[in-house]
Amino acid sequence: MPAPLPPEKAVRLEGELLTLLSQADRALGRLDGSIQTLPHPDLYRHPIVAVTETRDLIQTSYPAANNLITQFVTHGVLHEMTGQKRNRRFIYRDYTKLFHDDEERSEAP
């Protein structure tokens, strides 16, 4: 059984331990920034979505769903496909390209 926490003796953060902790902290910061660009798992089941569908799918408010889609568009995950200002639909193009044969894949936008 491990010793109870906190340890009786204080841990000294210096030298190699401090360096490793700093490196881990920076790595977590980079991961936190990149996690925003990862597609939501539901995009694999619904690669073409509208804001209202996304709202219902992830059970959130319309503004939150719209913000999520806007972030995905900004990061190149989703692409608007209607050219309209209302009733827009967005496609997870990189995923849907996987289902085209090689010739179609090279021609797909």
Image (cartoon, rainbow, N blue to C red):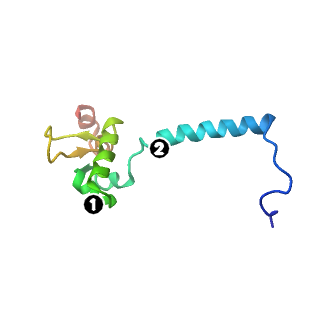
Cβ–Cβ below 8 Å for labels 2 and 1?
Answer: no
Give how far apart the Cα atoms at labels 2 and 1 are: 22 Å
Position of residue 7 measured from the top left corner of the image (x, y, whole percent): 82, 56
Which residue is labeled 2 in the image? Answer: 35
Q: Residue furthest right?
A: 9
Query: From the viewer's perspective, is 66 left or right of 88?
Result: right
Q: Secondary structure at mark 1?
A: helix
Of the numbered discs 2 and 1, the one sitting upstream in the chain is 2
Quadrant location of the C terminus in the rendered image? top left
The 10 Å Cα crowd at callout 2, few under 14, some 14 to 19, many 20 or more, is few
Total number of numbered discs in the rendering: 2
Q: At x 27% / y 47%, what residue is drawn?
A: 66
Position of residue 93 measured from the top left corner of the image (x, y, whole percent): 28, 41
Q: Nearer the viewer, residue 104 or 26?
A: 26
Q: At x 22% / y 55%, what residue is drawn?
A: 52
Quarter of the image holding residue 77? top left
Position of residue 63 measured from the top left corner of the image (x, y, whole percent): 28, 50
The 10 Å Cα crowd at callout 1, few under 14, some 14 to 19, many 20 or more, is few
Q: Say which amino acid is labelled 2.
A: Ile
Q: Say which amino acid is labelled 1.
A: Asp
Q: Nearer the viewer, residue 39 or 62?
A: 62
Q: Secondary structure at mark 2?
A: helix
Quarter of the image holding residue 54? bottom left
Quarter of the image holding residue 6? bottom right
Position of residue 4 measured from the top left corner of the image (x, y, whole percent): 79, 64
Q: Residue furthest bottom?
A: 1
Give residue 56's mark: 1
- Note whether residue 94 is visible: no
Quadrant location of the N terminus in the rendered image? bottom right
- Note whether residue 12 is visible: yes
